[in-house]
Amino acid sequence: MQPQPSRRRISPRRLAALASVTVLTLAVSTSAGNGRLSPGTSTAGAGPSTLSRTSVHAPCMISPEGEVQMSEGIPTAPGYTRSTGTVRALTLMIDFSDAPGEGDALDRYREFFPETSEWFATSSYGRLDYRPELPVPDWLRMPKSFRAYGIERGAPFDPGYRELVRDIVAEADPEVDFQSYDLLNVLVTPNAGPAALDTVLSVTFAGNKEAPSADGVPVSNASFVYSRQDDGSGSYDRTGYRVLPHENGHVFGLPDLYTAEGGGAVGHWDIMSEDWGANNDLLAWHKWKLGWLDASQVGCAADPGTREYALTPLARAGGPKLVFIPLDDHSGYAVELRTRAGNDEAVCRPGVLVYRVDANVDTGMGPVTVYDSRRDSGGCTRSPNVHAELSDATFVPGESFVDRRAGVRVAVTAAEAEEYRVRVTRTSPG
């Protein structure tokens, strides 16, 4: 008997935040590899599902102890969209009688593309070929008014979104073969609902096997984007698209890293934490989880003793990228090198980032915590809408992260232009 999808609502993001709120209806027991809209034609599943528990990496492949909403565990639970190879994103623009589309629907599409595809290509080192598909280049008018669907901040899937998905399918089906796509993006006319400064409505339903079907397959991985994330700083034309890579991160199985207090746990070090302001990348842990890093690029420091590791900048393809120090079967410390390159334009203090990952913590509840090397410094960034305090969290040569209770020490011993070295010491096995 398969467990039923959870319908628990996620803690809301702070009201002032300009990022998207994600409410998840999860079906963690869907068949392996069938995260795309067409299970019958899906090839390999999500990138992480191809990871094998080798003797070297098994201690570092943490997993949840029970049912967790969108766990940080590796491999990712089945049911999500695969995150490697060619992924076809069905993209539809919709409007309503009480919120008619303003201007050309293609202008709405151009707010997100080609930037979203380029962001994924850069972050994945070319391993994800993200292709937006636009079979209907016009506004799709929904049969009910926007108000009638009852869409609001934190709205659950039933009944409003279920009705909306059914109506989208009915309107698009004559021109769309839903079996041909891996995920669905719904770009809602921006004048539907409140401005992002008031309330953020953007949402993703991922791994939802009980979603309405289209052409014989469930529309189980769908992202909805509403008002423009424009804070008045004049950066929307450069940064407004980033809500979509964040939302699509959920269809690949990544959780929200912000908490009810805002982005304080991770700051701007991952787009799943802050998707507004200057560009930022994903954590190395997420890149391993998505299948964008090879096992040879990940060091697993599970045994007692002292060992040195090399790290190359996360933004650069190739080379060692991540050291993981397991604390138990469901948590551990991750160590990586961040520099200002690639998607990481906001990095103001290059260095080694140390954070804890806990597979037992639900999405939106703080599954990742970045440790600040310079607590209460105020940070080093001057970029608008970037969590400042954690911007200088990285460790540089001569500095160390220490957890005495766990018997773990991470010392940064050397730094060159293209490589840092860290010394990991642990007094007990993970």
Image (spheres, helix red, strand yellow):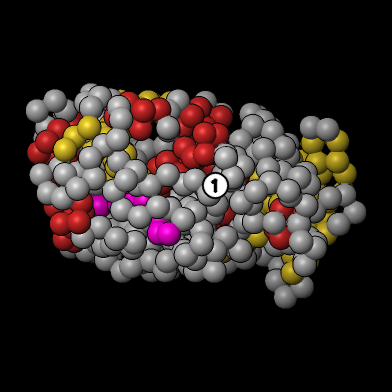
> What is the magenta range?
198-210
Q: Residue furthest bottom?
A: 405
Q: Quadrant of the N terminus?
A: bottom left
Q: Quadrant of the C terminus?
A: bottom right
Residue sitting nearer the eye, 301 or 130? 130
Residue sitting nearer the eye, 79 or 153? 153
Position of 217 with respect to 110 (left or right) is left
Look at the image and say whether residue 209 sits in the magenta stretch. yes
Estimate the x, y position of residue 189 in percent, counting from the top left.
30, 41
Residue sitting nearer the eye, 108 or 89? 108
Q: Is residue 423 visible?
A: no
> Identity of the amino acid at label 1?
Gly
Position of 413 with respect to 166 (left or right) is right
Residue 122 picture quarter: top right
Estimate the x, y position of residue 304 in percent, counting from the top left.
73, 61
Q: Which residue is mark 1?
A: 232
**316 is higher (above) or lower (below) than 308:** above
Q: Residue at x 42, y 33 (%)?
A: 112
Estimate the x, y position of residue 214 in percent, counting from the top left.
13, 39
Residue sitting nearer the eye, 67 or 395? 395
Estimate the x, y position of residue 240 in percent, counting from the top left.
49, 40
Q: Residue at x 65, y 39 (%)?
A: 344
Look at the image and say whether residue 39 sits in the magenta stretch. no
Q: Residue at x 16, y 44 (%)?
A: 97
**3 is higher (above) or lower (below) than 166:** below
Residue 267 picture quarter: bottom right
